[in-house]
Amino acid sequence: MLAVIAAVAFASSLFSGVAQAATGKTLPPTAGNFDYQIGGDYPPAADVQIVSRDHKGSSAPGMYNICYINAFQTQPGAKNDWPQNLLLRNSAGNLVEDPGWPGEFLLDTRTASNRTALLGEVKVWIDECASKGFDAIEPDNYDSYLRSTGLITETHAVEFMKLLAQYAHSQNLAIAQKNTLELSGEADSIGIDFAIIEECGMIWEGATGPECPDVYAAFGNRVINIEYTDDAMARACKDYAGVFSIVQRDYEVTKNGPRKTCPGGGGTPSDTQAPTAPTGLTTTGSTANRVSLSWSASTDNVGVTGYDVFPDGTKVASTSSRTYPTRV
């Protein structure tokens, strides 16, 4: 019978094969030196290989260029640039504003018709990115559903991200997942190519450690990380310098503002312990020929990126999810 699930901390990402699926797109160089320039274009330092800039800016010659778009909420002062029926309103008819960013109002992704209409608006920016020679797009505020007072769900956000990914790929652009680590399990099915994460080296209130191991577990070395504090930068650099891209910028991402990189670094994270055994193995369904299983996550000092499945002691599959058979 199916009984044993063996957890393994893979050095390479199971996700990377999916990232190559679309034709015509290119991915950022692994652990390439990065500069986050969404606050305004300026000449990159000599060591920079990857640049992220606002869609209103220009691509940087000779670089891998990522185009920033605010795809899930408005830019400050730009609410009137959107069809008003596509802005999220509460039961009182008031626009829902991002509490952390005054002047940014959430877009209403709750219906298929709204998502199609919103894509029609965002397409203009994606086309602009492609025509300017950008290589990828970075749709920000994927996690805005968390600030919607319950009006928008994870499903709404995922369905809109699918439309963005499909259209980006049709324009030969890669697409990054911005933050939103809680939805990283959906990245595979959506077609996300890599991740742009802010502050994975930060230890947030109530957490026991930084999120970098979880980021690595989800995306392997297809990660670009931006830190804003010295302590978090030191944590990120300690194990992940040379593994994925890491840069420190100022909170305002000021044009020509301060930029720091890790002082050296190896090519693999410091994995000093075996992952814990997964627990909570349960049967979620069965047919005449197969049983579907699910289990609780393993933990590791660096990160668990996959699980080997052993029925009767013989390995039959590897999966990055916590279910088997894997979802298609």
Image: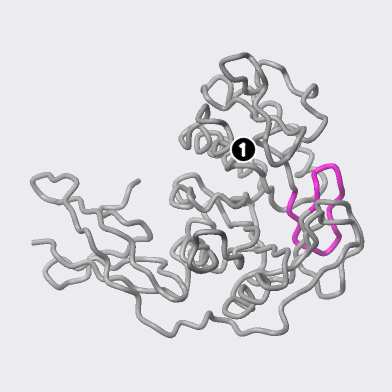
Vertical relation: 47 (above or below) 132: below
Q: Residue furthest front?
A: 206
Residues 131 and 30: in front is: 30
Residues 149 and 20: in front is: 149
Circle 1 crowding by C-alpha within 10 Å: few under 14, some 14–19, many from 20: some
On the image, which quarter does residue 120 sit in? top right
Which residue is at 59% across, 76% downward?
Answer: 240
Decide if residue 107 is on the left or right side of residue 278.
right
Residue corresponding to mark 1: 167
Main SS category, magenta section:
loop
Vertical relation: 1 (above or below) 165: below
Considering the image in quadrants, where does the N terminus appear?
bottom left
Decide if residue 131 is on the left or right side of residue 301.
right
Residue 288 place in picture, x, y as percent: 8, 46
Vertical relation: 119 (above or below) 320: above
Which residue is at 69% across, 41% downward?
Answer: 100
Magenta part of the chain: 53-67
On the image, which quarter does residue 242 sit in? bottom right
Which residue is at 71% across, 78% downward?
Answer: 262
